[in-house]
Image (spheres, rainbow, N blue to C red):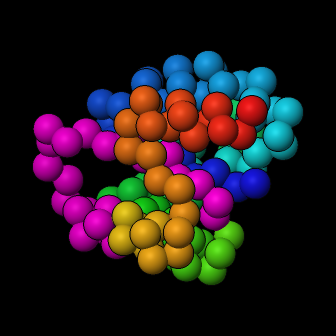
Amino acid sequence: MTIAIIAHDGKKPEMVQFLNEFRDTLQSKKVNLIATGTTGAKTEAAGYEVEKLLSGPLGGDAQIAARIAEGKVDMVIFFRDPMDKHPHEPDIFMLMRLCDVHNVALATNPATAGLLMKGLE
């Protein structure tokens, strides 16, 4: 299983904390993580093996969207900051749209992501 993880700047610590809560599940299910650049770097620093793509604003969201379209992503966990503007909003909306088009599970907050992870257990 491949899970894409993305977190806006203010949500990156929350993403690492979330991953730590589900470390056993991620390891036991042999989940492959892919992430946008900085999220991937923070995840790697927390001891996870992760494939890092470009930073979101530099095309990382689009890279993940392409993998969704190719059928290479099973789930997306995207901790968005709804209170901030993001210059790459079109890429974000494209990624979310492709999750719907290709029936890929998408969580945009820890509560929903937690339910998805419990489903893996």
Assess whether residue 82 is covered by the magenta stretch: yes
Q: Give the percent coordinates (x, y) of residue 75.
A: 59, 54
Q: Is residue 113 above or below residue 100?
A: above
Quarter of the image where one finds residue 82: top left
| Total labels drawn | 0
Vertical arrangement, residue 17 with respect to residue 116, above or below: above
Q: Residue at the spot x=45%, y=37% of the render? A: 112
Q: Quadrant of the C terminus?
A: top right
> In x, y percent, where is residue 19?
60, 28
Q: Is residue 106 above or below residue 68?
A: above
Residue 63 in view, yes or no: no
- Residue at image coords 68%, 70%: 72
x and y, in percent, of residue 11 in the image: 36, 31
Q: Is residue 23 magenta?
A: no
Q: Residue at x 75, y 54 (%)?
A: 1
**The magenta stretch spans which residues?**
73-94
In the figure, 70 relative to 74: above or below?
below
Of residues 93 and 45, which is closer to you in this image?
Answer: 93
Instruction: Determine the residue positioned at 44% across, 24% down.
Output: 13
